[in-house]
Amino acid sequence: MKEDFVLQVKGVNKSFGGVKAVDNVSFNVFKGDILGIIGPNGSGKTTLVNLITGFVKADSGTVFAGEKKLTGLAPDKIAGLGIVRTFQIPRPYHSLSAIKNLVVPLYSSRIMRTIGGKLGDRDTVALDILEEIGFERDAHVPYKLASAFSEGYLKRLELARCLALKPHVIIMDELFSGLSVSEIAAMIPMVERLQMNGITIMMVEHRVRELFQLANRVMVMNFGEKIAEDVPDNIMKSDIVKQAYLGVT
Amino acid sequence: MDKRKERLDRGIKVRTEGIYAISSWRGIAYVLLPTLSFILVMLTLPLIVPSTTWQRIMTIACIFALLALSFDFLAHFVGIVCLGGAFFTGVGGYISGLLNSAFGLPMAITIPIATIAGGAICTLFLIPCLPIRGIYFAIVSLMYPILFHRVIQALNIFGGTDGLPGLATFPNIWVELYSIIPITLLLTFGLRRLVNEDFGIVLRAIKDNDQAVRASNINIAWYKTKAVYIASAIGCFAGACLAHLYGWVGLSLFALDFSIFPIAATVVGGGGTLVGPIIGAFILAPLSEMLRAFGPLRVVFYSLILAGLVIYKTEGLLPFLQRKYHQFERWTEV
């Protein structure tokens, strides 16, 4: 395989007190991938996302994006490189309307730089992005305060915030959790469309069925360690994964 | 003929809060009336009040209003609880006073310099505390005025405990009033405009969720620094004006009142409205003067009134008035 990694994680470690949250994890994300990450609760998935995006400092190990070393960079710098994340618990700006929620990433230096500051009216751009992500343009929904939205809309808003940054890698931290089956069914084509647009995706997910439908590679974590990495079909059959999840031997 | 009641904003109010679809002069009048009446009252107030003493109280209220404005801006739009009012007035006042007494610069130069440079100095001191939030920032900002007070006292610099007397003052009460009141209005509505511009939206986002802002490729420390600069420059302007109102700067410019009063004014007027703190200051400052008749009991009554206002109008006066205004009804034919 041609080695065009967009992300290269080399032996990262992170302990919280005596707990090894992430234990010597290494993996690569290739361009155009949808890499799924699964694992039981507390297996270090979110910590791994935090390590890559700079929200948590690694004890050791490095993360590269192409030639660029991400380890040690501030979260806003990493986002500026086009590696953006969603949060497991949506973090909208409650006192702002959906449109104004998107004005924030549109005001970032990454967007100012790429567009050259001539973005025009940010509200209009925000409206376009919201429509793309499933907010009805003609309704008053985009003008509602974020505090009024249901979980499904908040998750979409999280994704919209990422898209506004024109990313090339999106790390989705449990995007589907807390959503109803029909809401997930509506989100799946969105994720597929992102992949078709050339965005590399890393998904941390508990919804295994939907994830296996989307992902082309799946990594399994348990107790902070990477225990398997393969195509979805093989992961399904793997004994080591069954053991981690179900405790059977 | 049947009649029924109808809200005044029916027909122009869009379902989303704060958005109006205006197509007539009546619609424009409905939306602008509160703002215009506020400006009108502010500008005519000095003409109505009975004596020069009361006019002077108006200017002092304006100074406090500016400090309250700066507090409200930081607390409700950036999420920084800053008790640095005394720090700002002290730094602004001393810069202005020193420039005037040592170099003999006129007021028209010292006040702008004190505003710009004072804002920069205060911001520099507050930058190390920006990563800490909530009550911790408040404590540090409260410590600085005490620090400066003691340093000036101990080293006997800038006039020491005597302060710097004999500064230039405003030529008369009218110049004083009609330079400070319009500037207060300008800053209030300027800030209100700013918090709805894209820059202000980023600040409000930082207040709501700073981690999400960081994940959006925005350096929150830099934005917070800019916000603190705006707030401290307003505070320093107030301090510089105060120095020239009294014609004297002294250690009392670092008094705790300048930190605490703005909070009271903001709470009474309604936080997060920017106009509310101005109204709050214009209620509390005259109230405090009126209660002088009670002598030592003044503070008791003041506290009781303040407690009453907070308990019975927790949201603040302006949000209350706003709600009432929007609930006005008229009779229409069916």
Image: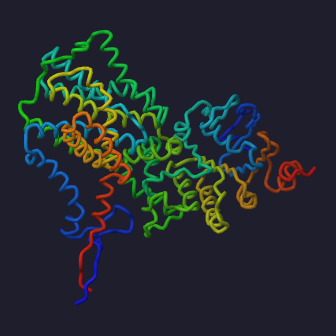
Q: Quadrant of the N terminus of chain A?
A: top right
Residue B149 location, x and y as percent?
Answer: 32, 19
Residue B284 location, x and y as percent?
Answer: 25, 43
Query: In the figure, B41 relative to B160: above or below?
Result: below
Q: Nearer the viewer, residue B214 or B323?
A: B323
Residue B189 seen by the camera:
no
Query: In the figure, A52 relative to B253: above or below?
Result: below
Q: Which of B198 and B17 is in front in this view?
A: B17
Residue A170 location, x and y as percent?
Answer: 60, 48
Residue B297 seen by the camera:
yes
Left of B53 or right of it: where is B119? right
Residue A18 location, x and y as percent?
Answer: 75, 31
Left of A53 or right of it: where is B321? left
Q: Quadrant of the rendered structure where residue A216 is?
A: bottom right
Q: Nearer the viewer, residue B288 or B134?
A: B288
Q: Which of B17 and B173 is in front in this view?
A: B173
Residue at the right extreme of this rendering: A249
